[in-house]
Amino acid sequence: MSSMAIPVNRNVLLALASVIVLLCSLLLPSTSYSQVDTFVFDTDEQQNRFRTLSNELRCPMCQNSSLSGSTGGVAEDLRREVHRMIMEGVSDSEIIQFMFERYGDFILFRPRLTAGTVLLWFGPLLFLFIGGLFAFGIWRRARKISDSDTELDKSQQKRLQQLLGDKT
Amino acid sequence: MSKLRFYLPVLGFFFVAIALWRGLYLDTKTLPSMLIDKPMPNFELTSVDGIDVSNSDLPDQIFLLNVWGSYCLPCLIEHPTLMRLSEEGAIPVVGVNYRDRQGLAIDWLADNGNPFSFSILDESGRFGIDLGVYGAPETYLVDANGVIRFRHVSVLDETVWQEQFLPAIAELLEEGG
């Protein structure tokens, strides 16, 4: 570009900048509610419950996404069921029970505490405990070595002197 | 004691190694069915042929409940096995036409043959939810009392029939006396 100064209206610059910011914001990915469902709710509370539930429930087919983030056929059907039950006044825990009875622990991102899921819930704590035991053992041994046994008793001193004396 | 100290990390290593090695071969895709030992869910629907069907239309003997759809390629792979079973009269096969269109289902059966006593038409997938279906094909083994006893997810070929279904059926017959 030439070094010639171009007279630019400040307002035009501002308008241009805001248009650019607007365009950039369109490029940002939308949040996790990427499924475009056309569910209609009576209240915001119902809609929030729907969002929470469909994020808490896992799609049985496309295994690592929630119901809300999945395009799978089953996920679509299950979202529709969640919507239907919310509109019929079914409680959250009853909806979760409904899903559990059909698809098991798998469908819950927070599985219930049963004999089969104990390790899942408390395994990390168990490993932390084992690691803690090792760390404690190492720490205790290190302290023992630094505190005691660093000084020689009389006979050891004598032997040391002997050895050193031999060398010189 | 000092020997144990030495071997403990080695043992730990092998424990973790075996656990991870097993993890590599775990089947995480196949979910266990929640309906094992539970009665078939109630249904009052129509068949693919447009006839009203309900639980009372189910066979009074051990039968297969096969979830299928005209869009489902693996269903075509298992189709010859289902055809053989039904032609030989080995076991009645009831279909669940899952998330499909009635017209497409009728055409598919006309093209490929119909091994089913009847097929429950489940266009919305609502009956599938009651069964805990998460994708066609799935095959359920139902006993004479209408209780679901076994489920196989994905293709039911001759190998699966021989190795999984025949032993399961033999077990059911044994306990039935």
Image (cartoon, coloured by chain):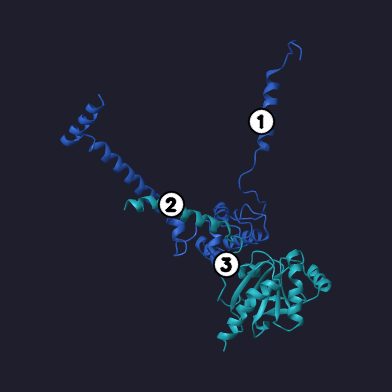
Chain colours: A blue, B cyan
According to the picture, the residue beneath numbered tag 3 turns out to be: B32
Q: Residue B131: x and y, percent?
A: 62, 70
Looking at the rendered structure, whether the residues under marks 1 and 2 are on a common chain is answered as no
According to the picture, the residue beneath numbered tag 2 turns out to be: B10
Q: Amino acid at mark 1?
A: Val
Q: Amino acid at mark 3?
A: Pro
Q: Is residue A3 left or right of residue A69?
A: right
Q: Nearer the viewer, residue A143 or A54?
A: A143
According to the picture, the residue beneath numbered tag 1 turns out to be: A21
- How far is disc 3 from disc 2 in space, using C-alphas? 35 Å
Q: Nearer the viewer, residue B23 or A115?
A: B23
Rendered view: A6 above or below B125:
above
For marks 1 and 2, give the one nearer the viewer: 2
Rendered view: A143 above or below B169:
above
Q: Quadrant of the C terminus of chain A?
A: top left
On residue A73, the disc is none
Name the secondary structure under disc 1: helix
